[in-house]
Image (spheres, rainbow, N blue to C red):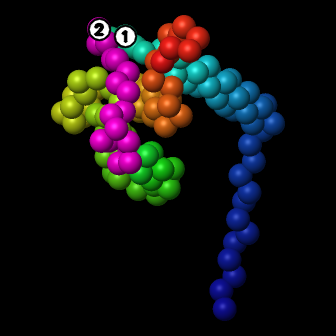
Amino acid sequence: MTLEEPKEESKVDPETTAFWDRLGKELTSNYKKDLENLMKNDTLQHNGTTYKFLPVKGKDIIKFKKLDSESFKIEDKDSQAFYDNVKERACIVIEGMTPEQFDEGDYVILENLTTAWSSRAIRGFHRAESRVPGVL
């Protein structure tokens, strides 16, 4: 039998914990505002590139809903599968997006845009602009 030395507990000072908690809350709040803004707009301009929302075509809706549903199951489990899922959804909801463009683009922007526009497409909100009552 060997004696193990007692493990020293790592202690984080309360100020540091408070800092990270405050920063986390602020970033989460900003993310929600950005996501809401993306959902309300049909276009996004970023670093000289314009991305446009493309409503999901009828022939793609079942596949799209399946991809969207799968994304929640794999996000924290399989990074490559999640990346491929986001790429495939991006090619459906971003006008003109190709797998090659996705691979070369700003991943964080494309993931956020795909998340926002996927949510919008799943709920059937095809256009962000105001509509005349009774006219689709």
Query: Which of 42/73 is in front?
Result: 42
For image coordinates 64% across by 29% down, the residue present is: 28
> Residue 26 placed where, x, y %?
68, 23
> What is the magenta range?
48-64
Q: Amino acid at mark 1?
A: Gln
Toward the left, the furthest residue is 100
Regarding mark 1 in the picture, which secondary structure is present there?
strand
Residue tagged 1: 45
Q: Amino acid at mark 2?
A: Gly
Q: Compared to 106, does 131 lie above or below?
A: above
For image coordinates 45% across by 23% down, the residue present is: 126
Q: Quadrant of the N terminus?
A: bottom right
| In the displayed structure image, the side of residue 4 where residue 47 appears, left or right | left
> Residue 23 placed where, x, y %?
67, 26
Q: Is residue 16 visible?
A: no
| In the displayed structure image, the side of residue 23 where residue 134 appears, left or right | left
Q: Compared to 24, does 63 lie above or below?
A: below
For image coordinates 30% across by 41% down, the residue present is: 59
Crowding near pointer 2: few (<14 within 10 Å), some, many (20+)?
A: few
| Alpha-carbon span between mark 2 and mark 1 | 6 Å
Residue tagged 2: 48
For image coordinates 25% across by 27% down, the residue present is: 97
Q: Are marks 2 and 1 in contact (CB under 8 Å)?
A: yes
